[in-house]
Image (spheres, rainbow, N blue to C red):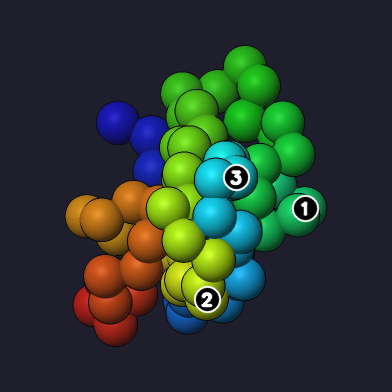
Amino acid sequence: MNNPDIPQKAPYPAEVEAGKSYWWCACGKSKTQPFCDGSHKGGPFTPVEFKATKSEKVWFCGCKHSAQKPLCDGSHKKL
């Protein structure tokens, strides 16, 4: 199984807007972390959609190993 790249061992804070969709980078190669820029094309990973139900700050996973993808669950502390 291929493992994703780890762009950083910390979450990415982001202000999200209610009703909008955000596409989280699952491969770790995107230059626009934590969001997808299409760098996964041709690889085993696909972006994960996050639909904001309210406007707030959320913490997107930066290590790509969270069990709660696309949000951080603290998995980076074990890497």
Residue 11, percent from left and from top: 48, 75
Q: CA distance from mark 3 to mark 1?
A: 21 Å
Mark 2 falls on what kind of element?
strand
Q: Residue at x 54, y 55 (%)?
A: 18
Residue 58, percent from left and from top: 47, 71
Marks 3 and 1: CB-CB under 8 Å? Answer: no
Would you say 37 lies left or right of 59 here?
A: right
Q: CA distance from mark 1 to mark 2?
A: 21 Å
Query: Which residue is tagged 2?
Result: 57
Circle 1 crowding by C-alpha within 10 Å: few under 14, some 14–19, many from 20: few
The numbered mark, 3 or 1, whose residue comes first in the sequence reads 3
Would you say 60 lies left or right of 73 here?
A: right
Q: Quick check: 50 above or below 58? A: above
- For the question of whether residue 65 can be seen, the reply is no
Residue 75, percent from left and from top: 27, 71
Q: Residue at x 48, y 37 (%)?
A: 49
The numbered mark, 1 or 2, whose residue comes first in the sequence reads 1
Quadrant where the image shows the N terminus: top left
The quarter holding residue 34 reads bottom right
Mark 3 falls on what kind of element?
loop
Residue 27, percent from left and from top: 53, 42
